[in-house]
Image (tube, rainbow, N blue to C red):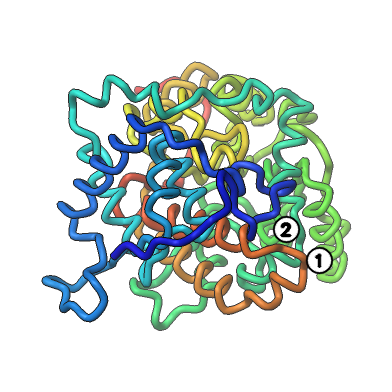
Amino acid sequence: MDVPGRTPPGSRADVDAGRWPDVARIPPAGPARTAVARYLVGRALRRLDLIAPPAGARPATVGPRLVLHDPDAFHRRVGRHGLIGFGESYMAGEWDSDDLAGVLTVLAGHVDELVPAPLRRLRGLWVSARPAGDRNTRDGARTNIQRHYDLSNDLFAAFLDPTLTYSSAIFRALPARFDSLASAQHRKIDRLLDLAGAGEGTRLLEIGTGWGELALRAAARGARVTTLTLSEEQAALARERIAAAGLADRVDVQLRDYRDIEGRYDAVVSVEMIEAVGADYWPAYFTALRRALAPGGRIALQAITMGHRQMLHTAATHTFISKYVFPGGLIPSREAIAAHSAAAGLRTAADDGFGEHYAETLRLWRERFTAHRPVVTGLGFDPVFQRMWEFYLAYSEAGFRSRYLDVRQLLLTEGTPR
């Protein structure tokens, strides 16, 4: 259902242009691009039955629906910037849905069919390369981490569970009716610590501290933990939580790049860190893991993955997520992990996937974020940010629900693959 809206020529008066320049600015009307976008998007939405019927009309089927409030701006953005424009149009309030994750799941499940094959060769017309400045050099990695994880500890507390764990949980059963998110996060952490063989006296290295929950649970088992992060906000709160638990003598939180690891460890654990490393630095990441491992040691990783062909396309493309959420990051394929870990002298001894559990985790995060909008507003995050964050959570959930994405726990040990 199209509900045309009036906007000032070339911009949105209701968006802070200083904070959100590309959301405030509506791309100029390029007749050819806009017409192609109108045709392709309309064709896809009609075929997937995602367009809401006119007011008062009964839908032919029951399912998620997309409602256009400003179709001209919507098609201009998609025609000019593809999927980034699609997300920015949502941030600008130019379209909505009563089931955002549902709409995005349908689109993710048919992503390879949305553009007719002959037009896929023209993909370069509406996608752009990743900015060179987002590369994860030592300085770049620190800046990229700060742009996400240093937004505000209170922001993350508004939608995470009390453990402040920002990675996939593992539930007893799905959907998660009889399991709290906190207990499901502890189940995930305990599986990783078991995989790594962490116990009394274990020298354990964690790459990517988060807010300290894994380090706390490892220390409670009797391990001596060194945990690394580049986020000053996370480090400060993690130290507070560790001290409050009386475990400061067992956990050393360091502001340190993974490339600067010192010492050898019986166990190394890294949870959803590889996605932030960037493809250029995966060799350095796995080399650092191998270098940190004492003889007979074990490495437990949790990693989001995507198909190898999709990874290669994403690596060459500036995406909504790389622009607004995780600059410099890239989700690896299982093939990429296997190749880079083997090149560093590691072999995969175990590999278990549980993507449907990440979809459930993200659903719960999104529900909590929506329920705590007044808190988020009070922290100074404007409506455009809130729509961006909601889109990011729903977009990620859709990736796992459609099986475009997966999440896996892997055990790596010394030696080459058999």
304 or 364: nearer the viewer: 364
Pointer 1 local density, CA inside 10 Å: few below 14, some 14–19, many at least 20: some
Q: Is residue 390 above or below residue 286?
A: below
Find disc 1 in the rendering and name its residue: 241
Return the mark for residue 54.
none
Return the mark for residue 211.
2
Which sits earlier in the primary sequence, circle 1 or circle 2? 2
Identify the element where label 1 is drawn.
Answer: helix
1 and 2 marks in contact (CB < 8 Å): yes
165 or 187: nearer the viewer: 165
Left or right: residue 191 compared with residue 19: left
Q: Provide residue 390's location: percent of width, then percent of height.
A: 52, 62
Q: Is residue 111 above or below residue 126?
A: below
Q: Provide residue 397's location: percent of width, then percent of height.
A: 41, 58
Left or right: residue 73 compared with residue 51: right
Task: Name which quarter of the figure residue 151 lies in.
Answer: bottom right
Residue in the image at 50% along x and 36% along y: 28
Residue in the image at 43% along x and 21% along y: 339
> What type is the residue that disc 1 sits on?
Arg
Whether residue 204 is visible: no
Whether residue 71 is visible: yes
Q: Quadrant of the C terminus?
A: top left
Residue in the image at 18% along x and 60% along y: 49
Left or right: residue 33 compared with residue 148: left
Residue in the image at 69% along x and 29% along y: 292
Gap in Å between the C-alphas at discs 1 and 2? Answer: 8 Å
> What type is the residue that disc 2 sits on?
Trp
Pointer 2 local density, CA inside 10 Å: few below 14, some 14–19, many at least 20: many
